[in-house]
Image (spheres, grey):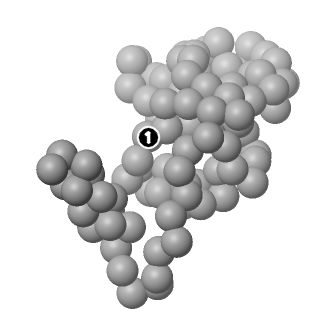
Amino acid sequence: MSSVSVREFSYNPSAMFNRVEQGETIEVTRHGKVIAVLLPGSAGLGRYSPLVAKGLIRLKATTTADLDRMPSYDVPADVSPLDLLLEARAEDDR
């Protein structure tokens, strides 16, 4: 994941969008604080986009190919995905 300042972004936003279109994720910062994250528009992100938008998770993958390799879980509507993940991690530690 790359990081650019608001100033750098404002100089050439089309170049930033081109990088994102190529699969790169870019954090936009102001005074060192992340204020936006540009994510590639991809079907691989569909499941995670709402969580990223709410700030509940941060993706560290840099390409859509990395995101496509992330596991996918079938989660019933009445179950918390976080609870399932923590349960799976607990089972792995046993």
Task: Name the residue at 64% across, 12% down.
Answer: 8
89 is higher (above) or lower (below) than 22: below
Q: Is residue 50 visible?
A: yes
- Is disc 1 surrounded by few (<14), some (14 to 19) or many (20+) residues within 10 Å? few
5 is higher (above) or lower (below) than 68: above
Tell me residue 27's x, y (percent): 54, 27
Quadrant of residue 67 in the image?
A: top right
Q: Is residue 23 left or right of residue 6?
A: right
Q: Is residue 17 visible?
A: no
Q: Nearer the viewer, residue 25 or 80?
A: 80
Q: Which residue corresponds to mark 1?
A: 58
Task: Name the residue at 55% across, 22% down.
Answer: 1
Q: Is residue 84 left or right of residue 52?
A: left
66 is higher (above) or lower (below) than 70: above
Q: Residue furthest bottom?
A: 78
Q: Residue furthest front?
A: 94
Tell me residue 61's x, y (percent): 56, 30
SS state under label 1: loop
Task: Name the residue at 67% across, 20% down.
Answer: 9
Q: Nearer the viewer, residue 15 or 61?
A: 61
Task: Name the residue at 81% across, 32% down.
Answer: 21
Quadrant of residue 34 in the image?
A: top left
Amino acid at circle 1: Arg
Tell me residue 71's x, y (percent): 53, 50
80 is higher (above) or lower (below) than 60: below
Q: Residue furthest left?
A: 94
